[in-house]
Amino acid sequence: MFSRLVLLLPGTVNYAKFDHFFQKNDYIIAVDGGIEHSLPLNIEPNLWVGDFDSCKLESKTQFAHIPTEVFPTDKDLLDTEIALSKTKDLNVHECVMIGGMGGRLDHQLSLFMLLTNHPELQFIHTDGETELYSLNHTIEHKIKADSFKHVSIIPITTLEDVSIANVKWPLHNVILKPGKGFSISNEPTEKFIHYSQSKGLGWLVLTN
């Protein structure tokens, strides 16, 4: 049994932040050029998927022993969506996406909206500098935040009964609607912040 799905995505990663991060029962999928994170992170993916248009040519030889699923460049899905399709077979409800920040804005926005098609998955998306935590309907989070300067709540749909504590401007049972700046750039005041809501989809974002 696997406890969570870990996706290695192309993009810059601060590897130092991932010491003691990986768990014994992680199922790790390298998504295209994300394979290049495996050596610095000292992990070996269980699977390598994609159309292989963003990986280095030498990687195809270096990692030839890893099982692959190759897809055409002209397709209807992101490589990350293909990787996420494995969650049902793995019976996991948590997904960590490492990398995938910066670069093309259309890809960034597509990754941000993946939650709408996978509301059953608890997502963490991080490059070792910025951290995003998915907000899925009824949820409670206790998140270590003492190394960050800012915490923002970004609704994708209307969030109801939102409460956040251990921040400069606490909220208690408020409604947050998409497109408003009310919940942007709060500041952690304690080692851990506490977040809860009763309904809606969105992201909690920690930045410096």
Image (cartoon, grey):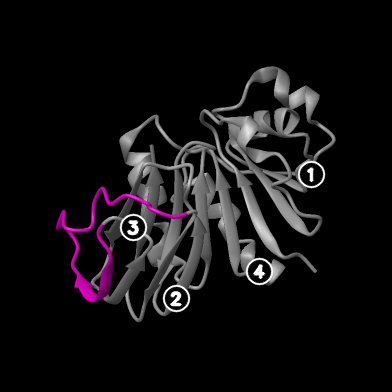
Crowd around label 4: few <14 · some 14–19 · many ≥20 (10 Å) = some
Dot 3: element: loop
Q: Name the residue type under label 4.
A: Val
> Is the C terminus in the top left, top right, bottom left or bottom right quadrant?
top left
Query: Is 96 above or below relative to 91?
Result: above
Q: Name the residue under label 1.
A: 67
The residues bearing labels 4 and 3 have C-alpha atoms spaced at a distance of 31 Å
Q: Name the residue under label 4.
A: 92
Query: Is 106 above or below relative to 140?
Result: above
Relative placement, left or right, of 173 versus 39 is: left
> Is the N terminus in the top left, top right, bottom left or bottom right quadrant?
bottom right
Disc ID at residue 139: 2
- Give the mark toward the camera: 1 or 2: 2
Q: Which of 107 and 71 is in front in this view?
A: 107
Disc ID at residue 167: 3
Is the residue under label 2 in contact with that under label 1 (CB below 8 Å)? no
The residues bearing labels 4 and 1 have C-alpha atoms spaced at a distance of 20 Å
Main SS of the magenta part reads loop
**Residue 112 at x, y percent in the picture:** 38, 51
The structure residue drawn at horizontal position 80% and vertical position 39%, both measured from the top left corner, is 66
Q: Name the residue type under label 1.
A: Pro
Asked whether residue 80 is drawn in magenta, I would say no
- Give the mark toward the camera: 3 or 1: 3
The structure residue drawn at horizontal position 32% and vertical position 72%, both measured from the top left corner, is 163
The structure residue drawn at horizontal position 14% and vertical position 58%, both measured from the top left corner, is 180
Q: Nearer the viewer, residue 160 or 164?
A: 164
Relative placement, left or right, of 6 versus 66 is: left
Dot 4: element: loop
Of the two numbered discs 1 and 2 on the same chain, state the one appearing first in sequence. 1
Of the two numbered discs 3 and 2 on the same chain, state the one appearing first in sequence. 2
Identify the magenta region.
169-190
